[in-house]
Structures are given as C-alpha cells and as structure tokens.
C-alpha cells in the first residue's frame, strides 16, 4: 500500500471512528483510506465547518475525532475551528495534505500555523514509519488532550509503505495522583470552611469526577457549580448552582460571592468563570485542582494549588475527612432559595416583547418547555448566547456543547451537527444569531443531507448585536453593524427545512406540530427578538473592556 492508505487505515485502527472534512486532490486518498478502515466520514461544505463539527463530536462523545483537509488553502479555511479546538484542549487530529515546495501555490508553513494557534504539529516524512506516526498522533491527541496537526506531504503520500498492521494505540497514562501534603491541606481547608463552593470545569467532565465531587461535597456541605463548558454536570442535584460566572443567575452569583472557600476543579478560573474576579469574595480562600501544573494560578492568585486528576484528588480528599458529614453551606434557607429561584427559568423579569419582536427570555423558556428533555444543544457566540445557554436545560454535560474559547461567531451550526452525530438519540438544537447563521449558511445543506432532525433557533436582531450594545451608548455610528431584515425562514426553506417566523409566543405553535410529526426535515425558527438592551451576560462582559 502507499503512505496515504497506510496513514488512513492506521488512524481508523487507532480509534478514529468519525472524520469530517472537505475533500480535495491532496486529501482524497487518505480520506478514502480512513473510511476503508472502518470510520464514518461526513463531508462538510466548508473546512471551517468541518473542523468545528469534529471538535464538537470529540467533546460530546469523549472520543478522538479527525478532520481532513486539502493542502494550504484547505488548512487555512479550517484554521478558526482548529484554533477553537486547540484552545479548548480537544482531542482532535487534523490530517492535512502538505505542499513542501516553496514555489507551490499551495505552500504555507503549516507547522508554523499550528504553533501559532496552539496545536501540536507532526509530519509523516518517512514511508517506513508512516503508520507509527499516525498512531502517535492519535495517542497524543487522546492522552494529552491536544489538537494535533498531522501533515502529510504530497511527495510522501504515494511512496510505498510496509504492508503490515498499524501498531496498537499506547495505553493511557495513569491519572495524576495528588501530593499527600496537598491533599491534607485541602482536607483541612474543607473542614474549616463554613460556606464552601465547588466550581467544576472541563477537567471534571466525566462520570468518575461527578461521582467523586458530589460525594466530597456531601461530606463538607459544599454547593456545586460549573464553568460554562461543563454545564449539566450536576443536573438535578438539589445543591447545584448551575453555571458560575457571567451566565450565573442572581442567586448563584450571590451564593458564590458569599463563599468562604472556593475550589476550582479542572477549571481555569478565568475572567468569564469568575466575572473578572468579582465573583470571588475578598476573604474567600481559593483553591485550584488541575492535572496540568501550568494551569494553577494562571488567571488569578490562588491560596492553594493541587496538581492532580480531579476524580482521583476528590476521592483521596474524601478519605481524609474525619467525622460525620457537615452542613456547611447547605442550610434550610439556602435549600429553599435554590428550590424557588435557583436558575434563570425561575427568575422573574419584565417582558420586553412587542407585537413585532419577542423577548428572547420568553422565546427560550417557551421552547425549553416544548422541546424533549433529551437534547443536545450547540450555542454560537453573540449578544444572544446567554439565553439558550441558561434557559435551555440539558440532561448532562454531554448535552451542552459550547465552542466559545476563541469567541468566534459562526461556529454554532457546525457545533450542533458534530454534537448531533455524537448523541444520535437526542434532539439536536442549534442556537445561533442571524450574523453567525448567515456566516455559516452553507452547512444548512449538511444538516438536510444528513437527515438530522435538528431545531435551529435563530435569534434575529438584524445586527451584530454585541457591537451595537457595546458602542451604541457612546453615540457611535452603527451602520457597519446593522443590516436590513432578512427572511431567514425563506432561506432555510430553500435548503429543505420546515421554517417559521416568530414575533410573539403564539407564533411558536407550529413547533408542536413539527415535534409530533416524522421530523424528516429539520426545523428553523427565525425569531425576531427585541433589540433595546444587551443581554445580562454582555453587560457583565463589558465591564472587562
């Protein structure tokens, strides 16, 4: 076999079950080989969409995914999605054909591009070891939680490779065990604390971590919160605060600020999770647990840093706690408040809707009540993003996919496609703004072609709303960020969607008919939302600018 076939089959043998991409001459052979090896391939309409689909699939399935692209322009088209994945430590292998001759029109310094966005670069440069390098790329992505760019030079692809099975995937390294002295210090801090709060992040998104954290929280009386990317981890837990940071409900923000001990578990504790630091009380003792030593204290000063796997550390600390479980923050008053107004769906607001435009809170709360509880939600970026993130409930952490580490708009639709393929038994929901939807409209066809029963909610304010609300109060000219109203429903019908335009809550009635039907076509909701005020999370974000 040639190198392209050896690499493709090795990737599939190493555990790549799902690949995405846009096929050109440079990646045609390797993509076919991945499929021949047993993987499923989804052809996107744009490489940027393909990269984000693969990113979302990996996050939501817990498996490594691949994206294949043409040399040069195929890779640069995919770069925003790759950057998002790299910043999010997504286990992803980008298989990129490579033109190595500087005079080629397709030549770019592909390893430099990878380094610039935080991805690991590897190259197939020897036919004899091509399969070994491909397996090593998968192992690096999976075991180190890294996005890997695997460059496949055109001149090497056609060389003869040894016709032998690919080497087995190396075993995962053992979870990082915490230092005994650090465990003791954390246990002592928990026993002293009267109002402890746990904030779990990306590094806690596993059944083992959830179980260990809930058990430790029970022992010390801690309340449970998550960063945005781990939303759903503690779903239905009576002492859960949902998401910490800019998305936090008023009650959650009040309780987190009132904590005397805050422990971040596998979370960066960045400005979004802590509201630029203001969410952490001045007298609170701050602890961070992470298996990456470089993560400790990277965003703010901490009182104690513990290097260790989240599940292993929480379980070990539990063993150190003496005596019966403590009440801690779990008082009757706090429990009653959480039951009454513990999330945004139970927080009162003044409806700003008119006959022409619907309040996005009213819209999203109504859809939350209508749509099946077993759902997977992908959210784009923009002024609107807090509403679907906080008013649409999800069954667990794999029901919410938040590709926002790079804060690019236009990723939401592809996010929902990748998440839908990873969770085929759940209703996929894409929450997008009008700007992000139009930026990624080519992937509307992908949804139809894959026969995904997806609901696309377009929060349509005929503008780049974040910029309108950011610069508008200063009197700036906003013509560059406002647009004529677009009939998004008509565009969707052209792709084969069922579609409706919503200005009032009563306009949502056809959603029930679609849900009761065969769902053979996806549904797009063009929601004309109110435009007078920024969302609450955006007001918070502006304070950091």
Image (cartoon, rainbow, N blue to C red):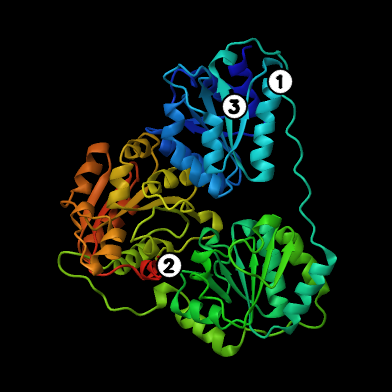
In the picture as drawn, the residue positioned furthest to the right comes out as 180
Q: Are the residues flagged by discs 3 and 1 in contact, CB closer than 8 Å?
A: no
Element at label 1 = helix
Q: Place residue 257 in its image quadrant.
A: bottom right
Tell me which label, 3 or 1, sits earlier in the chain.
3
Which residue appears at 15% of the width and 51% of the height? Answer: 484
- Residue 424 seen in the figure: no
Secondary structure of the residue carrying numbered label 3: loop
Residue holding disc 3: 38
Expressed as whole percent of the image width and height from the top left, the position of residue 207 reads 66, 58
Residue 325 found in image quarter: bottom right
Give residue 544's mark.
Answer: 2
Is residue 156 shown to the viewer in this render?
A: yes
Q: Is 475 on the left or on the right of 31, as rendered? A: left
Label of residue 129 in the image = 1
Residue 356 point in image, percent of width and height: 15, 64
Dot in front, 2 or 1? 2
Residue 164 against residue 429 in the figure, above or below: above
Disc 1 crowd, CA 10 A, few/some/many (<14, 14-19, 20+): some
Chain-order first, disc 2 or disc 1: 1
The residue lying toward the viewer, choosing from 2 and 375, is: 2
In front of the other: 475 or 188: 475
Q: Which of 373 and 30 is in front in this view?
A: 30
């Amino acid at each position: 076999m040639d190198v392209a076939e050896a690499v493709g089959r090795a990737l599939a043998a190493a555990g790549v079950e799902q690949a995405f991409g846009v096929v050109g001459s440079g990646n045609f052979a390797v993509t076919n080989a991945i499929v021949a090896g047993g993987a499923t391939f989804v052809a996107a309409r744009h490489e940027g969409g393909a990269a984000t689909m693969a990113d979302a699939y990996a996050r939501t399935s817990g498996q490594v995914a691949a994206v294949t692209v043409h040399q040069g322009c195929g890779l640069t088209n995919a770069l925003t999605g790759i950057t998002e994945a790299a910043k999010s430590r997504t286990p992803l292998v980008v298989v990129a054909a490579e033109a190595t001759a500087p005079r080629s029109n397709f030549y770019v310094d592909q390893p430099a591009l990878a380094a610039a966005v935080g991805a690991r670069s590897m190259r197939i440069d020897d036919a004899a070891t091509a399969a070994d390098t491909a397996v090593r790329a998968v192992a690096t992505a999976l075991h180190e939680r890294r996005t890997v760019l695997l460059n496949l030079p055109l001149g090497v692809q056609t060389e003869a490779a040894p016709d032998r099975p690919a080497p087995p995937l190396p075993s995962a390294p053992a979870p990082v065990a915490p230092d005994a002295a650090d465990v003791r210090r954390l246990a002592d801090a928990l026993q002293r604390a009267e109002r402890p709060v746990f904030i779990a992040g990306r590094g806690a998104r596993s059944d083992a971590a959830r179980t260990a954290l809930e058990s430790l929280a029970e022992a010390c009386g801690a309340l449970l919160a998550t960063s945005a990317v781990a939303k759903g981890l503690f779903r239905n837990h009576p002492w859960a605060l949902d998401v910490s940071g800019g998305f936090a409900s008023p009650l959650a923000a009040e309780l987190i600020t009132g904590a005397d001990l805050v422990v971040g578990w596998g979370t960066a504790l960045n400005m979004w999770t802590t509201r630029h630091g203001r969410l952490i009380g001045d007298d609170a003792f701050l602890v961070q647990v992470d298996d990456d030593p470089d993560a400790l204290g990277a965003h703010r000063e901490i009182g104690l840093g513990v290097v260790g796997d989240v599940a292993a550390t929480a379980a070990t600390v539990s063993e150190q706690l003496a005596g019966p479980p403590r009440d801690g923050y779990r008082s009757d008053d706090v429990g009653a408040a959480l039951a009454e107004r513990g999330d945004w769906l139970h927080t009162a607001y003044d409806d700003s809707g008119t006959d022409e435009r619907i309040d996005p809170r009213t819209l999203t709360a109504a859809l939350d009540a209508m749509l099946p509880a077993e759902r997977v939600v992908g959210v784009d970026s923009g002024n609107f993003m807090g509403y679907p993130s906080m008013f649409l409930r999800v069954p667990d952490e794999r029901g919410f996919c938040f590709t926002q580490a790079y804060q690019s708009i236009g990723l939401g639709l592809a996010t929902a496609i990748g998440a839908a393929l990873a969770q085929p038994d759940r209703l996929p929901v894409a929450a997008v703004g009008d700007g992000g939807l139009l930026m990624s409209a080519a992937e509307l066809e992908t949804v139809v072609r894959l026969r995904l029963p997806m609901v696309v909610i377009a929060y349509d304010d005929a503008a780049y709303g974040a910029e309108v609300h950011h610069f508008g109060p200063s009197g700036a000219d906003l013509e560059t960020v406002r647009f004529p109203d677009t009939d998004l429903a008509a565009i969707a019908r052209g792709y084969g969607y069922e579609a409706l335009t919503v200005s009032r809550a009563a306009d949502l009635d056809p959603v029930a008919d679609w849900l009761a039907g065969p769902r053979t076509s996806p549904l797009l909701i063009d929601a004309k939302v109110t435009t007078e005020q920024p969302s609450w999370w955006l007001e918070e974000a502006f304070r950091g600018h």
